[in-house]
Image (tube, helix red, strand yellow):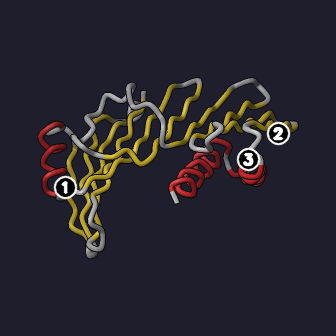
Amino acid sequence: MLRNTALSILLLSVLLLLGCSRARQAKQAIQTGRQLQQTGKTTIKTDEGELQIKTDKAGEQTTITVADESGEKHSITVGADLDTSELSLAIYPGATKEHGQVSTTDQGKQLSFVFTTTDSFEKVADFYKAKYSDGKISDIKMPDGRLLNIGIAEPPNMTSVAVQQTDDEDQVTIILIEQK
């Protein structure tokens, strides 16, 4: 399930990077990448540029690099084993890292990590409210759960924390996003 979630995030990111005109090629490349995971690397060349998919041998981390005709590169790495050392946001103590995504372009880097914990929503929310009390805090009670969103920095250095829990889940999900 984690691999399917990571690949879904990866596909969405590639589609956003490539734009709608190349979405069909990106989808085909992702499918090719899934099929060729055993080999670890595949490259697809088109008139508009090159798409490279590289998967580690365990299949736990995938990197897609897109180079357009001008040579500008966009890279996305998704997986459970991504390093969080570049992340300046606080990681909730004891939380388990589920997966991460690092997107790199000529303009910068975006780090996105998902963590879970069995601690209560209130305890996790209080931790992040105390850490980022100067941020834009939205604490929303939804019909089927709760969502806390803290906007810490505005674009282009968008940085945010989201804490969410649905009523039918025993765990709290924490999403940390940082633009560098």
Residue at the spot of label 1: 119
Could you give the CA–CA distance between mark 2 and mark 1, rounded to whole angstroms?
Answer: 45 Å
Q: Amino acid at mark 1?
A: Asp
For the point 52% across and 42% down, the residue is 79
Observer-nearest of 38 and 142? 38
Could you give the CA–CA distance between mark 1 and mark 3, rounded to whole angstroms?
Answer: 37 Å
For the point 74% across and 50% down, the residue is 21
With 180 as the anchor, is 106 left or right in this view? right
x, y percentage for residue 154?
Answer: 34, 36
For the point 17% across and 58% down, the residue is 120
With 139 as the anchor, is 164 left or right in this view? right
Residue 24 vertical position relative to residue 50 in the rendered view, above or below = below
* Local crowd size for mark 1, using a 10 Å CA cut-off: few (<14), some (14–19), many (≥20): few
State the mark number for residue 44: 2
State the mark number for residue 33: 3
Disc 1, SS: loop
Q: Amino acid at mark 3?
A: Gly
For the point 51% across and 35% down, the residue is 102
Q: Earlier in the sequence, mark 3 or mark 2?
A: 3
Observer-nearest of 54 and 14? 54
Q: Residue furthest right?
A: 47
Q: Amino acid at mark 2?
A: Ile
